Amino acid sequence: MKELVRLRMRPSRNRKAFRYMLDYVDRSGKRHQISLGHADKRQAERQRQEKELELRVNIVGPVSMKLTGFFQDSLARTKGQVRTTTLKETARSMRDFIACVGDIDVQDVRYEHGERFIQYCSDQQVSAATVAKKVKHLKRVFQLAEDRGQLDRHPLRKLKPSKVPRWKIRVFTDSECHNLCGAARQYEEKGSPIKWELLIRMCLGTGMRRGELMNTTWRDVDFGTMTVDVSPKNDREDTWEWHIKDTERRTLPLTADLVRLLVELQMSQPEGNPYIFVPMARYERIQGLSLHEVKELAGHAGIETTERFYLAVRKDVVDRARAASEASRRGNSVARPM
């Protein structure tokens, strides 16, 4: 059973101490964050359970609510459980749905409203892929409302947007990769503090995403085994919280050239910055922000969220992948959607 009340830690201004607080959303959709004034975990958990029981006793059946209020309530309830970027996408889908069907009572939403919404998006020249995402977000909202007892039924359960064809894959040629690295090198020579050429070579050689590269630390690189770990980061004194897309934790092989370039960068980089591709000036600026500000800028979910599952990669798989990566330098190696 999902918890209605969350126990959080609120650090002091000097970040040397903390106090527990209760975080919950009441029946009207209003969010409350109440400081307990102490750091006793056992006592805080007991207070959380008391508030949890209080809320559950007051839970009622389906209620009449306009879509605007219903969506606001849903966003408030799910905040901290999903990524901030996901919440923003859901909010946009909600606004579009209301623009299409009007601010009707949530109990009056029917399957035909979903069909009308799909047609509305099509008339607005929204791509099929985007329509599918909007429908997915809306269906999730109504599903959660049914699970919470706010709705007797999920009105859009069987709604299915048009299928989206897969992107055609185009492979970069050696010449294109060479030109891309050359342009990055020229950009660096003009004074850019970011190591663009190495960043691009890492992308080409490992297939890592932009966010994964920018959140890679020196601790993630194993020069002995010539591998790099794509792993989540906890909020620590020298790193900020970061989560992997789709919890896809993995170990990737590095070519000899990449290892050499990484060693050169490490030797030239000022001490005190654990991140490979974040310039020292930017790192110091981010470190000066509060934890909440960093989380919001990065578009991350709640502070307590951690990634618990990962993809285990056997050594023989890594070795074969490295061999393929080395061989790819002599042929077409990188693919992307056109």
Image (spheres, grey):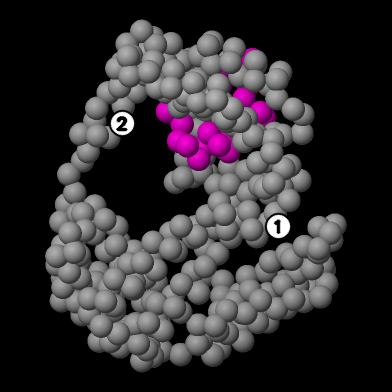
Mark 2, Cα crowd under 10 Å, few <14 / some 14-19 / many 20+, is few
Where are the magenta residues, as a range? Answer: 205-227
- Indicate left or right for 214 with 132 as reference: right
Q: What residue is shown at x 77% (from left), y 29% (from top)?
A: 271
Q: What residue is shown at x 69% (from left), y 39% (from top)?
A: 281
Q: Nearer the viewer, residue 176 or 239?
A: 176
Q: What residue is shown at x 46% (from left), y 45% (from top)?
A: 245
User: Can you say whether 270 is above or below 9 in the image?
Assistant: above
The disc label shown at residue 336, or none: 2
- Indicate left or right for 157 with 240 as reference: left
Residue 275: in sight, yes or no? yes
Q: Is residue 220 magenta?
A: yes
Q: Amino acid at mark 1?
A: Ser
Q: Secondary structure at mark 1?
A: loop
Which residue in the structure is indicated by mark 1?
A: 290
Residue 109 position in % (x across, y down): 24, 82
Residue 46: in sight, yes or no? no
User: Can you say whether 305 is above or below 232 in the image?
Assistant: below
- Indicate left or right for 77 with 36 as reference: left
Q: Nearer the viewer, residue 257 or 34?
A: 257
Q: Quadrant location of residue 191?
A: top right
Q: Amino acid at mark 2?
A: Arg
Q: Secondary structure at mark 2?
A: strand
